[in-house]
Image (spheres, helix red, strand yellow):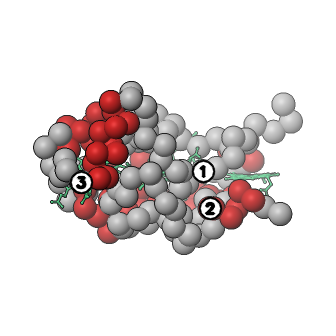
Amino acid sequence: MKLIGSWILAGASLTQPVPFSHKQHTANVACNVCHATAEKAERAGMPAVSQCMLCHENVKRESPHIRKLAGYQKDNKPVPWVRVYRIPDFVFFSHATHVGAKVECAACHGPVEQRDVLAKEVATDMKSCIDCHKSRGASIVCNLCHELGQ
Ligand code: HEC
Ligand code: HEC
Ligand code: HEC
Ligand code: HEC
Ligand code: HEC
């Protein structure tokens, strides 16, 4: 039984602690404002609650969802967002090199700016990595992505 697979199945939507909508937020805020290290590091990064509260100290502050958000800030706790995309630890992957090579966010995550709720809609299995590498002339040697025989 692949339990992990049950929540990362393509198309399955996840219940987040606060119903954050990318569609509602990406018209005025660029991806890299909230995912600040997508161009410079392995991980794209997640926004701090304080970043949300820059607007939500005023915007919709009476909403129960925003009150919940303010509660995380007050308790000095990160929002426990449920991860959507995840690859195993034995695979090396860096956002910085892909974004630097002009691979769009949408090639690996779909049209995020049109989504109210994110789901894993693009596969990140070995075949998908290799298919794109072949089509873009990037290397497919095993130890590009794995440290084998160590
Ligand atoms: C640039 C300002 C801005 C930032 C930053 C921002 N929001 Fe918002 N948010 C808005 C606006 C504007 C709305 C729509 C309000 C409306 O419907 O009138 C909204 C709506 C929401 C709602 C729906 C509230 C409701 O009950 O209708 C949630 C939940 C929310 N935001 C969460 C977040 C979270 C979580 C973050 C941080 C990751 C965040 N927002 C960052 C401006 C912002
Ligand atoms: C206002 C802040 C904000 C902006 C702007 C924003 N995001 Fe997000 N992003 C979040 C938050 C909060 C989550 C966690 C909740 C969720 O998964 O919907 C998230 C989750 C994600 C995830 C899933 C991460 C995972 O694996 O769990 C992806 C992919 C993503 N964002 C891509 C984008 C892209 C691409 C853009 C620009 C088109 C963008 N985001 C713009 C706040 C933001
Ligand atoms: C070549 C494919 C690819 C591209 C391009 C890409 N991502 Fe990702 N993204 C992934 C993979 C794979 C993961 C899972 C990484 C892991 O588990 O270590 C991920 C994870 C994430 C996460 C979860 C948090 C994290 O840092 O791991 C966010 C947020 C995210 N991506 C946002 C973005 C944004 C924003 C862009 C564009 C600026 C982008 N991604 C471009 C493949 C990609
Ligand atoms: C949509 C296209 C695309 C997808 C999908 C993709 N890659 Fe890549 N990848 C590239 C391109 C283009 C390069 C060449 C970048 C360069 O070195 O200029 C690259 C380079 C790399 C490199 C070498 C550069 C570095 O960061 O060390 C690694 C490792 C890598 N990819 C891992 C992965 C993994 C793992 C996946 C799947 C989870 C993946 N890639 C999915 C397009 C893609
Ligand atoms: C472009 C990146 C990339 C390259 C090149 C690559 N792999 Fe992988 N490999 C992955 C990813 C991503 C996974 C994890 C897939 C998942 O999410 O389960 C993986 C998983 C695996 C696994 C675990 C079992 C499985 O199938 O999930 C083995 C074994 C493996 N790779 C061997 C290899 C060998 C041998 C080569 C060379 C012929 C190779 N890989 C080349 C990205 C790559």
**Number of marks drawn:** 3
Residue name at image x 69 percent, y 46 percent: 88
Q: Position of residue 11 (x, y in %)?
A: 54, 72
Q: Which image quarter is the C terminus in?
A: top right
Q: What's the distance in space between the residues labelled 1 and 2, CA to CA?
A: 8 Å
Q: What's the distance in space between the residues labelled 3 and 2, CA to CA?
A: 30 Å
Q: Which image quarter is the N terminus in?
A: bottom right
Camera-side residue of 105 and 66:
66
**Mark 1 surroundings: few (<14), some (14-19) or many (≥20) residues within 10 A:** few
Three-letter code for the amino acid on which mark 2 is drawn: Ile
Camera-side residue of 128 and 77:
77
| Horizontal side of residue 51 vs 14, given as left or right | left
- Nearest to the eye among marks 3 and 2: give it: 3
Image height check: is 1 above or below 103? Answer: below
Q: Please say whether residue 68 is visible from this viewpoint.
A: yes
The residue under label 3 is 63
**Mark 3 surroundings: few (<14), some (14-19) or many (≥20) residues within 10 A:** few
Image height check: is 76 above or below 47? Answer: above
Q: Please say whether residue 134 is visible from this viewpoint.
A: no
Tell me the number on the disc at residue 125: none
Kindly indicate the quadrant of the structure image that contains residue 127: bottom right
Q: Position of residue 41 (x, y in %)?
A: 46, 34
Name the secondary structure under disc 3: loop
Sequence-wise, which precedes: disc 3 or disc 2?
Answer: 2
The residue under label 2 is 8
Residue name at image x 59 percent, y 65 percent: 123
